[in-house]
Image (cartoon, rainbow, N blue to C red):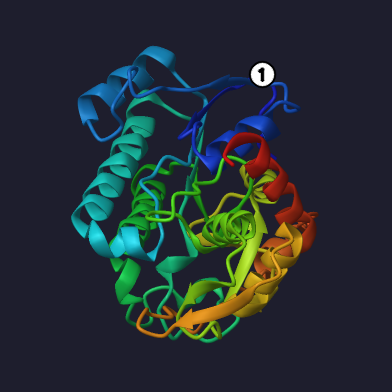
Amino acid sequence: MYSLSGKRVWVAGHRGMVGSAIVRRLAVEGCEVLTASRQDADLRNQAETTAWMDKTRPDAVFLAAAKVGGILANDTYPADFLYDNLMIEANIINGAHRVGVEKLMFLGSSCIYPKFAPQPITEDALLTGTLEPTNEWYAIAKIAGIKLCDAFRKQHDSDYISGMPTNLYGPGDNFDLNSSHVMPALIRKAHEAKLAGAASITIWGTGTPRREFLHVDDCADACVHLMKTHSAPGHVNIGSGEDVTILELTQMVCDVVGYKGEIEHDLSKPDGTPRKLMSADKLRGMGWTPQVELRDGISAVYRWFLDNKA
């Protein structure tokens, strides 16, 4: 067991959806939560990042800082997604070693796995095949983060671990249709179509790809659980263990939002990976299970959207 009580815990990326959820979860752990704004340090800059860590001296780090986006954003800005994420993770992981951080958790993404990995995807599927081309830049950066943690563990005996969340959703999500993931994009599309009285909404591709979703508060709880109980090389999948088709998800979102129109398909747009369901066996074996059902989670997020973004 690694106790967080009384520790100085830096949540890197605290303003993001995942980071803010981890901050909320840590409120009951009896620790001092540290955060760094862009004015404190540009995490892409090694000197600024190391100087901030040397000044604040965190005992533990949740590395949730990243440049994130959906298929369109990844495909449009490949250099930004690869460079920014490589710099952020390298600076923080190396800085953690230099200032004597006791434990670090690196957060990646399910896109690290091959496009045609056997389903459900177990952790050992990493680097066994080619990546999905539309987000390979982000995936390569996240794979490098896992390996960097393992390298510091091997060379310096650093207690650095990695968790790979599935598709996340929750309060604080990005609802910009040009850069958002599928869940917030669907919520916004359905809401605006409802207000406009539109006859239909359009989704990309056939709607047949299957995706797994996890509420961000469940993800944060899993991260804290792993930080306290887990220490090993490699990475651990963080997911719900269940998936739905994009069409089923769209129908569920429309039902929650109250939109009654038709769902049309833009077949000129890519489907992406046919199915992406991560095995939850490893994490379940460590005694953790999710608590938020998908429909309940969508309802909660739609209420948050109405209160904060609509």
Q: Is residue 63 above or below residue 175?
A: above
Question: Does residue 265 appear left or right of residue 93 in this picture?
Answer: right
Which residue is drawn at the image coordinates 58% and 22% (left, top)?
Answer: 33
Tell me if residue 29 can be seen: yes
Q: Is residue 40 above or below residue 175?
A: above
Q: Is residue 233 above or below residue 245?
A: above
Residue 144 on image: x %, y %:
32, 57
Residue 47 on image: x %, y %:
21, 24
Which residue is drawn at the image coordinates 75% and 53% (left, top)?
Answer: 299
Report which residue position mark 1 lands on: 6
| The residue positioned farthest toward the top in the image shown | 55
Foreground residue among 207 and 130: 207
Question: Does residue 294 appear left or right of residue 120 in this picture?
Answer: right
Q: Mark 1 Cα within 10 Å, few/some/many (few <14, many 20+)?
A: few
Residue 177 on image: x %, y %:
43, 55
Q: How many marks?
A: 1
Which residue is drawn at the image coordinates 52% and 58% (left, top)?
Answer: 185
Tell me if residue 3 can be seen: no
Q: Quadrant of residue 191?
A: bottom right
Question: Does residue 70 appear left or right of residue 74 in this picture?
Answer: right
Residue 247 on image: x %, y %:
61, 79
Foreground residue among 162 and 158: 162
